[in-house]
């Protein structure tokens, strides 16, 4: 009888821990996404504005909508997740572009921004969930996806810039969701969580 009660209590504690981890994961994942964007904005907005100046000049000249700097920064932010941006072509199909990879201005450090923030998030989630082993920590840290995935999908639409007849410049939606939104927070959140769990052993 006591063992049953003990088992029920243990299960309730595990569920409570998982629930707390999910809530913290949603917050930490969302904060990681926002902070990642802000880091890219602070470090790259000037360069993005300069790069867009020529395009915006002609857009304004012919009465079109100019491209906002915050939107262009969003493209670079997704590029930092290895998510390409689809750019319509005047002739033929759209092409995929990664501005970070194609830049000769030494922007490769941006690739480290999302993983580092998600590792830190994973550590925080695991500690909040009370993870005491690397496995428990990894499971908790992966919950960063709860907050990161929705914003990654929303951002792919938010940073879309309409061009001409139904075309648009925007992060590739499938890759934005699966790679940036799912793989990144699960993998790097789990790494941070596992490290926190190992330290708690």
Image (cartoon, helix red, strand yellow):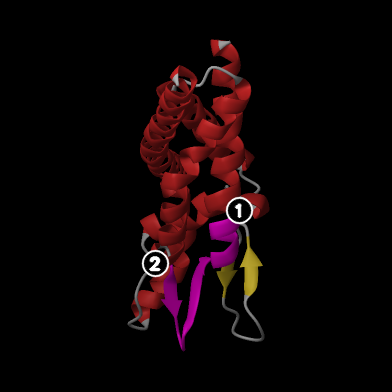
Residue 180, x across and y down, in percent? 56, 51
Find out whether residue 170 is within the magenta segment: yes
Which residue is outermost to the bottom?
A: 165
* Residue position marked by numbered label 2 in the rendering: 67
Where disc 1 sits, the SS reads helix
For residue 162, side relative to residue 185 (left or right): left
Question: Front-most of 14 and 9?
Answer: 9
Question: Front-most of 72 and 145?
Answer: 145
Q: CA distance from mark 2 to mark 1?
A: 25 Å
Residue 85, x across and y down, in percent? 57, 64
Quarter holding residue 92 = bottom right
> Where 104 sits versus 134, above or below?
below
* Of marks 2 and 1, the one in the foreground: 1
Camera sees residue 158? yes
- Residue at 44% x, 18% y: name it: 2
Question: Label 1 neighbourhood size at 10 Å, few (<14), some (14-19), many (20+)?
Answer: some
Q: Earlier in the sequence, mark 2 or mark 1?
A: 2
- Residue at 47% x, 39% y: name it: 144
* Residue position marked by numbered label 1 in the rendering: 179
Question: Front-most of 153 and 69?
Answer: 153
> Where 184 sits versus 192, above or below?
below
Camera sees residue 172? no
Residue 114, x across and y down, in percent? 53, 40
Magenta-highlighted residues: 160-178
> Where 50 sits versus 9, above or below?
below
């Amino acid at each position: 009888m006591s063992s049953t009660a003990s088992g029920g209590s243990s299960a309730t504690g595990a569920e409570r821990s998982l629930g707390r981890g999910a809530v913290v994961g949603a917050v930490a994942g969302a904060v990681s996404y926002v902070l990642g964007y802000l880091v890219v904005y602070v470090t790259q907005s000037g360069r993005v504005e300069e790069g867009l100046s020529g395009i915006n000049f002609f857009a304004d000249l012919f009465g079109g909508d100019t491209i906002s700097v915050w939107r262009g920064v969003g493209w670079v932010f997704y590029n930092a997740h290895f998510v390409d941006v689809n750019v319509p072509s005047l002739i033929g199909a759209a092409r995929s572009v990664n501005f970070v990879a194609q830049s000769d201005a030494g922007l490769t450090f941006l690739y480290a921004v999302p993983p580092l923030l998600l590792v830190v998030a994973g550590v925080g989630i695991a500690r909040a969930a009370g993870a005491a082993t690397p496995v428990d920590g990894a499971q908790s840290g992966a919950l960063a996806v709860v907050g990161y995935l929705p914003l990654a999908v929303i951002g792919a639409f938010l940073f879309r810039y309409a061009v001409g007849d139904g075309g648009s410049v925007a992060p590739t939606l499938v890759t934005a969701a699966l790679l940036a939104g799912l793989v990144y927070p699960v993998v790097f959140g789990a790494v941070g969580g596992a490290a926190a769990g190992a330290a708690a052993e």
